[in-house]
Image (spheres, rainbow, N blue to C red):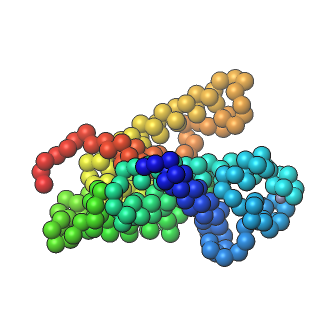
């Protein structure tokens, strides 16, 4: 990839990231994702075009509304930058246009799920069903780097059972804890992960998610116990709810982009 092309992908990613921010902000509010002008959440002023340029307008305005100077959430900037980075990673990894487009949709859905779950501790149904549908379609048509012909590259039974097998433990935890340890949304996300990554890689993604989730939990609880540390961490205890979805998605990204597959089984 040459520099101009990378620049193009970065801009595309930032624009899509900007749209994903709108989806995250408007999900479950009854507002349309596609119509209705963006406005400041504090003063309600409709934003003009140069206030809508991804990344640039946030930086130029130093993260504040031009009318009322109230702070704009850093989430907007972070999601735009993160989506741009993921898009570059997809273009670096994939070869065919169809597979690239497919993966851009998959990871856009995961950005929405991860950020929304982080903010509201619930996985949005629309985004996770979109992800599950894509991952199932991918089983039939998309193999890494190329679009498969279903007649030749027919998926095997183990590809189909990958999703349910990864989802089952999550569904069990949800059922037996009556939703206290984990939400049912995590089981839905895991179903998509199993189909998207395949059984072994999805298993490893869940393992990575658990390690990182446990490490973050321990750090947050420890910070809450140290006197003098910012009051933001004071309320974290062993009983605090931390959304697990973002960790599952970090695990998925890590396994997918770094091609981690510790258990290459040659059964097929
Ligand atoms: Zn304002």
**On screen, residue 26 above or below 178:** below
Number of numbered discs = 0
Residue 139 in percent (x, y) is at: 28, 64
Nearer-the-camera pick, 18 or 24: 18
- Most distant residue in the left direction: 267
Quarter for ligand 1? bottom right
Q: Is residue 146 left or right of residue 69?
A: left
Q: Is residue 115 left or right of residue 172?
A: right
Residue 1 appears in the picture as rendered = yes
Q: Residue at x 52, y 51 (%)?
A: 4
- Most distant residue in the right direction: 68
Q: Residue at x 20, y 44 (%)?
A: 264
Residue 105 in percent (x, y) is at: 45, 63
Residue 118 appears in the picture as rendered = no
Q: Specify the quadrant that holds the C terminus.
A: bottom left
Residue 246 in percent (x, y) is at: 50, 49
Q: Is residue 69 left or right of residue 215?
A: right
**On screen, residue 226 above or below 164:** above
């Amino acid at each position: 990839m040459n520099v101009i092309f990378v620049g193009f992908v970065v801009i595309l990613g930032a624009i899509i990231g900007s749209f994903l921010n709108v989806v995250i902000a408007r999900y479950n509010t009854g507002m349309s994702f596609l119509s209705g002008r963006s406005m400041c959440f504090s003063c309600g002023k409709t934003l003009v075009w140069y206030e809508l340029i991804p990344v640039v307008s946030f930086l130029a305005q130093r993260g504040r509304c031009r009318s009322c100077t109230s702070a704009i959430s850093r989430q907007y900037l972070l999601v735009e930058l993160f989506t741009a980075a993921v898009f570059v990673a997809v273009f670096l990894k994939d070869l065919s246009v169809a597979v690239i487009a497919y993966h851009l949709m998959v990871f856009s859905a995961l950005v929405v799920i991860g950020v929304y779950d982080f903010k509201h501790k619930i996985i949005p149904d629309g985004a996770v069903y979109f992800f599950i549908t894509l991952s199932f379609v991918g089983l039939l048509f998309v193999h890494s780097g190329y679009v498969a012909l279903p007649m030749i590259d027919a998926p095997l039974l183990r590809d189909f059972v990958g999703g349910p097998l990864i989802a089952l433990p999550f569904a069990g935890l949800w059922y037996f804890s009556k939703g206290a340890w984990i939400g049912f949304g995590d089981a839905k996300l895991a179903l998509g992960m199993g189909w998207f990554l395949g059984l072994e890689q999805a298993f490893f993604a869940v393992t990575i998610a658990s390690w990182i989730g446990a490490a973050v939990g321990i750090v947050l609880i420890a910070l809450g116990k140290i006197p003098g540390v910012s009051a933001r961490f004071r309320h974290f205890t062993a009983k605090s709810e931390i959304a697990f979805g973002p960790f599952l998605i970090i695990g998925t990204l890590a396994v997918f982009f770094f091609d981690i597959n510790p258990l290459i089984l040659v059964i097929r």
